[in-house]
Image (tube, rainbow, N blue to C red):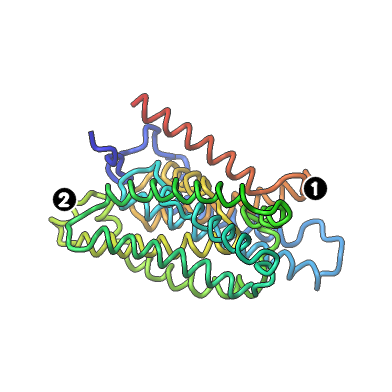
Amino acid sequence: MNTLSTSPAAAAPATAPVSWLGTPARRLWLLLALALLASLYFMTSQVQAEWSFVLPLRGKKLATMWTVAFAIGVSTVLFQTVTNNRILTPAVMGFDALFQLIQSVLAFTLGAAAMQIPELSRFGMNVGLMVLLSTSLFVWLFRGQASNLHLLLLVGIVAGIFFRSLNNFVWRVMDPNEFTVLQDRLFANFNTVSLPLLLLSLPAIALVGIWVWRQRHMLDVLALGREVAVNLGVNYQRAVMGVLVVVAILVSISTALVGPVTFFGLLVSNMAYQLMHSHQHRYTLAGSVLLGGLLLVGGQMVLERLFGFNTSLSIVVEFLGGLTFIYLLVRKAKS
């Protein structure tokens, strides 16, 4: 049986359309309005200090959350489109494990000097290495063949396991004091992103977003499957390669900016499919970004206002995403 048969376009959700919200376009406008209101409330609520201090601080957090929401939401929908499976995410390719391995090797080889590397240099190195390795893998597996998507996924899973095994080995032989410092870099953190890194990420995210939007009709065709796409005149191998490279860029930027967020994309993409109830990428892509931003902004406000930073936003997001993953596996097994 083909394990990649759950196409986002061909497999309609088991639930009925959300008809009371009208068309997908109306749902997007509603999400946009909610996102603007949530962002405005996040910026202006419970201000107990000077506005000149609060607005830049909260503005940086808000921009970071929306940047991550865009990168993770878009990359997950694109990856599920080319793999024709709503359960798979870019994390299956081992991006999070590769990021952790890079940080671990730097801390092990350079020790305390690793913490002295300038932020821009470390950010560029992380993004460059992840994009270079993933793109080299894509080119090697797709060179001269019609499609090696199944092999690509298998190699990605094996590579992720390999990177995690190396991580565990490095952690065991690492000095305990260095490992304590390293731990802060191994988990997603939305509160300590520097402004130069954010400003460096935004133009790259914007350029990728423009490319994705211009390719939205081609993505609709890819979601129908390889045979249909080829019959409709799509250069399938080239199209899939381009999408995978874009996925690698988006995931690399997001991971290098705040750290690995494994299940967040799975959560927002499947919420977008259920809410939009459409295979058109102009709706699912925008829906995943808006839902991701709402979850991050809303979650951050709950943690700050109600729980007083007693837990991390990434932990809550991963918990909800893990529950979504289990639910999708159980539902697919029953069907």
58 versus 277 height, above or below: below
Give the residue displayed 74% in from the left and 67% down from the top: 57
Report whether 292 appears left or right of 208: right
Q: Separation of disc 1 and disc 2 at Cα? A: 53 Å
Q: Position of residue 210 (x, y in %)?
A: 41, 71
**Residue furthest to the front:** 173
Farthest residue, direction top: 334
Q: Quadrant of the N terminus?
A: top left
Quarter of the image with the C terminus in it:
top left
Indicate the secondary structure of the residue bearing disc 1.
loop
Identify the secondary structure beneath mark 2.
Answer: helix
Q: Which residue is mark 1?
A: 308
Within 10 Å of disc 2 (Cα), the crowding (few <14, some 14-19, many 20+) is few
Residue at coordinates 46% horizontally, 67% vertically from top-left? 129
Position of residue 96 measured from the top left corner of the image (x, y, whole percent)? 51, 53
First in sequence: mark 1 or mark 2?
A: 2
Residue type, label 2: Glu
The circle drawn on residue 225 is none
Q: Amino acid at mark 1?
A: Gly
Q: State the residue position of label 2.
A: 227
